[in-house]
Amino acid sequence: MKALYKGVAVSALLCLVAFYFVTDILIGNINIYYASLVGVAIMVLMVVFTEYYTSTSYRPVKKVAEASETGAGTNVISGLAMGFESTALPVVIIVIGILAAFFVAGGAVNPAMGLYGIAIAAAAMLSTTGMIITLDSYGPITDNAGGIAEMAGLPAEVREITDALDAVGNTTKAVTKGYAIASAALGALALFADYRHKVNIETGGLSLDNPIVLVGLFIGALLPFIFSAVTMQAVGKAAFGIINEVRRQFREIPGIMEGTTKPEYGKCVDIVTAAAIREMVIPGILAIATPLLVGYILGPLALGGLLVGIIVSGLLLALTMNNGGGAWDNAKKHIEDGYHGGKGSEAHKAAVVGDTVGDPFKDTAGPALNSLIKVVNMIAILFSSLFIGAGIF
């Protein structure tokens, strides 16, 4: 982790140096440079807090592993609790960052400049994308290395090394997802401001005294939950199909367990590939159709409320899923390292159940919410002209 973080630190410093000269030449306003500093600071703090909740070295993962000693139920309860708890510090950092970027850019005097400062902070976060993609790629590489070592029958000490690298990979994957959702939240604020401008909603127009706004707010807050339900059910359906196929092969193809006959690997790959494409149709329709229907039927005020609701609930739900899933995964790794009975123990069996719950959390539904927030906001902006004067109310 230290070696990887050195790369992130160097990348961030290079960006900050470049920002100063670019800002000075193109804008000539040092306050905008300060807003970019805020964005990089948010990125660094999100990385630190995400590592705390997903690394095997700290309290949250150790607590989930300890809870596994009393069964799968307590493991799941502990993992959910840690996922919920993990939302607090990131939200505090994002809130402070939003206010800091707004005011350092001159928002107290000119609110439009303050919103521009928030957009610049989001862009500054994205400036380290190269290193973030590196961190995200690291996890699958080490995970597959461990799988190859096990399938190839390499010595146990090789698997021990790959397991340690895989645990780090789980943390880096969680770190990149926390970074992505934080940047989505900041970016969505700027997109929301652009939408409000395009449909001519006054600053006080989105009042909760207006039932149309409140209806949109509830729909927006609901959408991430429905979206997550659909994507997680998709994972369950694909897993069900794989399990049935594996059982069929064990039943109909003699010699698989003895190692004298190879399984039909291609059948399993076909099931997963087809399911991945087929099951994402409904989530895609949800992301595109919902803002269009709300904007056209209920009007631009309702759609404005929807955008606020999806930003708030999507951010919190994504943080819960990403960090909770990472904690479950590394709790299992922590037990496999020899703690709480080690691999094959009752605690390990419970941790496997928790990891099975955590995988669709951190690998499917959680990361997808980042895209959902951005897509819904972009659809609202792109079709904003259709919503002016629309709505049955």
Image: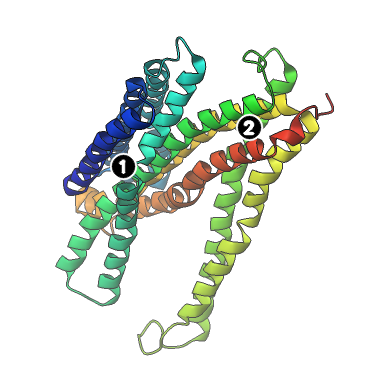
Quarter of the figure with residue 207: top right
Q: Residues within 10 Å of mark 1 (few under 14, many from 20)?
A: many
How many marks on residues? Answer: 2
Q: Marks 2 and 1, how far apart in space?
A: 29 Å
Q: Percent from the top left, x then y, of residue 258?
A: 36, 85
Q: Percent from the top left, x then y, of residue 147?
A: 31, 68
Residue type, numbered disc 2: Gly
Q: Is residue 157 left or right of residue 32?
A: left
Q: Percent from the top left, x then y, of residue 271?
A: 55, 71
Farthest residue, direction front: 25
Report if residue 170 is visible in the image: no
Q: Secondary structure at mark 1?
A: helix
Residue type, numbered disc 1: Thr
Picture layout, residue 19 above or below residue 95: below
Foreground disc of the pair 2, 1: 2
Farthest residue, direction left: 157
Q: Is residue 232 left or right of residue 84?
A: right
Report if residue 134 is visible in the image: yes
Quarter of the figure with residue 222: top right
Q: Percent from the top left, x then y, of residue 6?
A: 18, 44
In the picture of the structure, the residue carrying the numbered disc 1 is 54
Which numbered tag is attached to residue 71? none
Quarter of the figure with residue 203: top right
